[in-house]
Image (cartoon, rainbow, N blue to C red):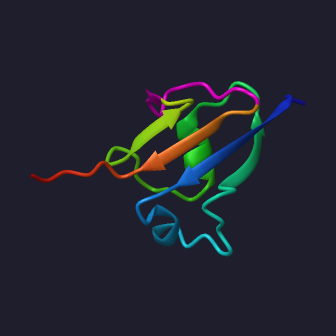
Amino acid sequence: MANEIAIRIKFFSGIDRELKLENYNHEQGLAMNVPAGKRLKWALRTAGMPAFSNHAYFRSGERISTRAKLRNGDEVTCLKPSGGG
């Protein structure tokens, strides 16, 4: 059996409402245990996110792609990029 790692995903810009996450706490985010070696895309699908390309993802202040491999203790921030002028 694969080892599991603990991660946390924080959804902003109304993404939590779109995913219909009950009792979602913006300060705590969504805590998940995922198999070691999985990528962010896998965790997002497991959380119920159907599409990924319209969002920005950050880990420790660095932008990452959905292909990034997750590490134990990762805290990933997910938001919709804003625009305007």
The residue closer to the viewer here, 52 or 56, is 56
User: What residue is rendered at 50% in x and 30% in y?
Assistant: 61
The residue closer to the viewer here, 56 or 48, is 56
**Where 24 sits versus 74, above or below?**
below
Q: Main secondary structure of the magenta part?
A: loop
In the image, is residue 22 part of the stretch drawn in magenta?
A: no
**Where residue 5 sits in the image (x, y, percent)?**
80, 33
User: What residue is rendered at 67% in x and 55% in y?
Assistant: 30
Q: Residue furthest right?
A: 1
The residue closer to the viewer here, 60 or 40, is 60
**Where residue 36 sits in the image (x, y, percent)?**
76, 28
Asked whether, in this view, residue 2 is left or right of residue 55, the answer is right
**Where residue 8 sits in the image (x, y, percent)?**
68, 45
**Where 78 sits versus 38, above or below?**
below
Quadrant assignment for the N terminus: top right
The residue closer to the viewer here, 1 or 32, is 32
Question: What's drawn in magenta, residue-wise?
Answer: 62-72
